[in-house]
Image: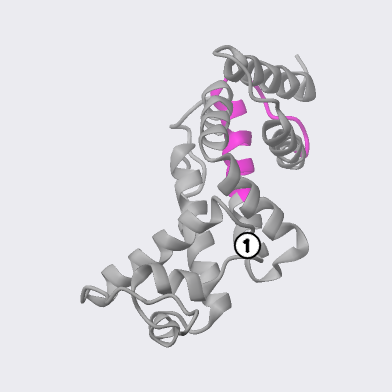
Amino acid sequence: MSGTRSRTPATRLPPEERREQLIGIGLELLREHSLDELSTDEVAQRAGISRGLLFHYFANKQDFYRAVVQVECDRFLAALAVPRDTAPTAEGPGSRELIGAFVDYVLANRALYLALVRGASGSHPAVTDIVEATRTRAAEWLTQAVRRDGRAPLPHQEILSRAWMAFAEEATTSWPPGGPGAQTELTEFLETSFQRLIGP
């Protein structure tokens, strides 16, 4: 008897729907595994298709990884109300709202967020540029949020914003889970750290 698990036959889907399905499965698996551990074999099995057919929709494994990461990075920016391809404008959230939205997103998607930021930190260079571009866009909008707060940005404000975001990533993913007030406490901690960084 073969030890191979049988694959449930796939429902026929239009190409774009199948691609979206495969990316969705990849994101589900990233809640349980690191990017390095993301198995295209398991993705194909869950979709009910062959691994070879998966690569009909993606050029190779790296292309699949990049598509998965790009979708989640877009969701992250959307959660911050930050358009991926739009330059910062005078309209949008202030720094307090932006920081609150950041905390909300990361705490709701902690495992997935960790998989992305750790995967981009060197263990998976195929996606580094996507994650770095996302951080840069968010930092640009954080800098603009300072202006919306009615404050003049400091010289090299975007460097400060990027540095604060690195700190916020570590603080948010390391913050111990707690009772009902833990999220509010974390948000206030990050808001205070940002205000102290940019000064009065």
Residue 146 picture location, percent across and down? 62, 27
Looking at this view, is 86 or 68 the one in front? 68
Residue 79 picture location, percent across and down? 45, 38
Residue 163 picture location, percent across and down? 77, 39
Q: Quadrant of the N terminus?
A: bottom left
Identify which residue is drawn at 69% across, 38% down. 169
Name, please, the residue furthest toward the front. Answer: 1
Magenta range is 135-156
Q: Is residue 117 magenta?
A: no
Which residue is denoted by mark 1 in the rendering?
35
Q: Decide: is 64 above or below 121.
A: below
Identify which residue is drawn at 69% across, 23% down. 190
Identify which residue is drawn at 42% across, 64% down. 23
Looking at this view, is 161 or 60 the one in front? 60
Q: Quadrant of the C terminus?
A: top right
- Confirm whether residue 136 shows in the render: no
Q: Main secondary structure of the magenta part?
A: helix
Q: Is residue 147 magenta?
A: yes
Q: Decide: is 38 above or below 87.
A: below
Task: Give the structural element (helix, strand or loop) at label 1.
Answer: loop
